[in-house]
Amino acid sequence: MARQHLPLRAVAARVIHAVSEGQSLSDALPPALAQVSDDERSQLQAFCFGTCRWYHRLQGELQTRLHKPLRKGDRIVVPLLLVALFQLRHSGQADYAVVNETVEACRSLGKPHLAGLVNAILRAAQREGEPEPASEAAALSHPEWMVEKLRHNWPDHWRAALEANNVQGPMTLRVNRRQGSRDDYLGQLADAGIGAHPTRFATYGIQLDKPCGVDRLPGFEDGQVSVQDEAAQLCTQLLDLSPGQRVLDACAAPGGKTCAMLEATDGLEMVALDQADHRLQRVRENLDRLGLNAQLAAADAANLDGWWDGQPFDRILLDVPCSGSGVIRRHPDIKLLRREQDIAGLAQVQLNLLERLWSTLKPGGRLVYATCSVFPQENHRIIQRFMKAHEEAALTLPDDLAWGLDTGAGRQLFPETGSHDGFFYACLTRIDPTDNQASTS
């Protein structure tokens, strides 16, 4: 039986509905992309990401226009209208086309009895323009709890961070220093007609003026360069890597930081963990493309009996599972999926991972704790809690760093429009008791 071909907006509505029901964009979008033609895929992706990015603001407008709640069986029309409102407010598409094609999509979704309602709502939205948002959270298009939490935690930074979340993040590259310098690769980009400039803080980072497909990047398939945000690249500067060290990347997938460490220093004995074997496949693919090697294991990092051979590590990168609140601009569905009550549970997981992996670190070794979060509860407060229980732990983040806000227990980067994502780093050294004895003798 031939598969029914749904209009683009109907497919987008189903994706947004799935996200509103708790499915991530990374899970909901790929099968939807397979339902549309090749030349529609970028547009479908733009519709879905854009609608999630502006979901709370669009929803606020729709509530002023949809005066009666729809029956449960008709609720697919709500995400359809949100997709249409996104196009009217943010896409630059012709209004008449948005209205007409959304009405047709409504019929194709099996809701012809609501076509008149859809037409009336969108004609009014076209005619009247966007209403004043009912709240600051709606204006900034974030859930209320997130706005209030950030306002309370970061009174000088919250608004700029939220505004940055609503702007698509830039495409940033990490040059493989084993294959050439950053200046050399900037020259290759210029020859290829791709505008780019060096990142401010990451030594081997390059930010493109406009995103492009990796197939356009010179030498990408040969491992000359990888796509990685500038903030994520900074881990190699903190680990103080040297040849011969035994290094653990505890939550490794998709492998960007694993590869960055191996590129930075020859002769590392690298162990990369992730709970899911299918996620480790991404790590394998990145290692193969870059010509790098690591020992991979699918395991829960906190369950030492399941993977650790008892040999301690010189360096540990612990990039813990977190709320993702620093990378919302790249994953706007986080605004719909994350709940305030999630943060306490994540913090417990993070502290447990830190406690467990600390025992695998050599005396004199260094552990870098990292998140892509902007919530203190997941970041410097975790470090403060840990330090109170561990006299043998010392904060050793360099004093001369040019990036991030000093929290007293690590450095916080906020997402910046046209620059890096939001990230947190703390650097802990396990004090060697023999060094301590020597200093007191």
Image (cartoon, helix red, strand yellow):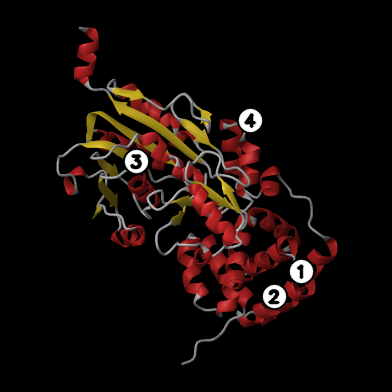
Q: Residues within 10 Å of mark 2 (few under 14, many from 20)?
A: many
Pick whichever, 265 or 32, lies toward us: 265
Which callout, 4 or 2, points to the residue nearer the camera? Answer: 4
Asked whether, in this view, residue 347 is left or right of residue 242, the answer is right
Which callout, 1 or 4, points to the residue nearer the camera? Answer: 4
Residue that mark 4 sits on: 156
Give the amino acid at mark 4: Asp
Q: Residues within 10 Å of mark 4 (few under 14, many from 20)?
A: few
Give the amino acid at mark 2: Thr
**Which mark sits nearer the N-terminus, 2 or 3?**
2
Instruction: Determine the secondary structure under disc 4.
Output: loop
Q: Do residues under tags 1 and 2 come within 8 Å of each other at their CB atoms?
A: yes
Residue that mark 3 sits on: 318
**Which mark sits nearer the N-terminus, 3 or 1?**
1
> Is residue 185 visible in the rendered structure shown here?
yes
**Which mark sits nearer the N-terminus, 1 or 2?**
2
Question: Which residue occupies 45% across, 51% down?
Answer: 175
